[in-house]
Amino acid sequence: MKKHKCSWCEGDALYEAYHDNEWGAPVYDDATLFEFLILETFQAGLSWITVLRKRENFRKAFDNFDYKKIANYNQDKIDELLLDSGIIRNKLKIKATITNAQSFIKIQVEFGSFSKYIWDFVDGKPIKNKHMSMQDVPSTTVISDVLSKDLKKRGFKFVGPTVVYAHMQATGMVNDHVTDCFRYEEV
């Protein structure tokens, strides 16, 4: 018997695997939170499947999303990334990745971890929504607006409310699986 899934992922094996195994599962590990944050910033203005298909290339190009290394990237590394056809070669997003890594480290110093900082916006536990269809799922919320403003105040780039809400969904800060999706109760 086929399991019911959120409609956005159906029809593409990579998308379905991401939905079935990652999307919406709570993430508390700083390294994984950083990876998702960077992937979401590159997704701005594009489709998620575009980024997902290039994820492994991003991992290679960005030192497995090692934010300590990325924070120290220089112009030579930026130039190298701009020539890498395996990733999205947007100069502003590449530079934002370096800035975001630096800001990420500052938050770790201030709060002990990025995880503690970001999860405090939802009182440390996932918000479990009860959406009947994908049309009911918002692209932003009051919390994503507040979090976006705070991240920008701390120096982050490409973190508008929509990008931030997508990050919250991906990392399980909110459960936006539709109620009849098999993952709704699992996460």
Image (tube, grey):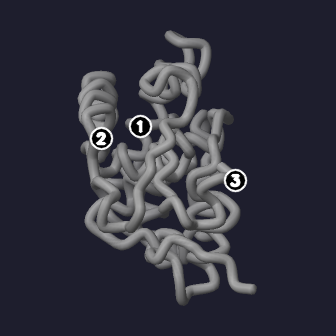
Marks 3 and 2, how far apart in space? 33 Å
Marks 1 and 2, how far apart in space? 7 Å
Q: Residue beneath label 3, please?
A: 186
- Residue that lies at the very extreme toward the bottom in this rendered image: 11
Please report the residue visible at 38 percent of the width from the left and 62 percent of the height from the top: 43
- Residue that lies at the very extreme toward the right in this rendered image: 1
Which element carries disc 1, helix, strand or loop? helix
Of 38 and 94, which appears nearest the observer? 38
Q: Amino acid at mark 1?
A: Asn
Please report the residue visible at 29 percent of the width from the left and 47 percent of the height from the top: 158
Q: Is residue 145 left or right of residue 69?
A: left
Q: Residue 42, how many percent across, how many down?
A: 39, 59
Q: Residue beneath label 1, please?
A: 100
Determine crowd level at label 3: few under 14, some 14-19, many 20+ residues with C-alpha closer than 10 A: few
Does residue 98 sit above or below 130 in this rendering?
A: above
Choose mark 3 or mark 1, whichever is in front.
Answer: 3
Q: Residue 125, how many percent across, how many down?
A: 57, 29
Does residue 38 sit above or below 69 in this rendering?
A: below
- Mark 3 or mark 1: name the one nearer the start of the chain: 1
Please report the residue visible at 41 percent of the width from the left and 62 percent of the height from the top: 132
The image quarter containing residue 90 is bottom left
Q: Amino acid at mark 2?
A: Lys
Q: Residue beneath label 2, please?
A: 157
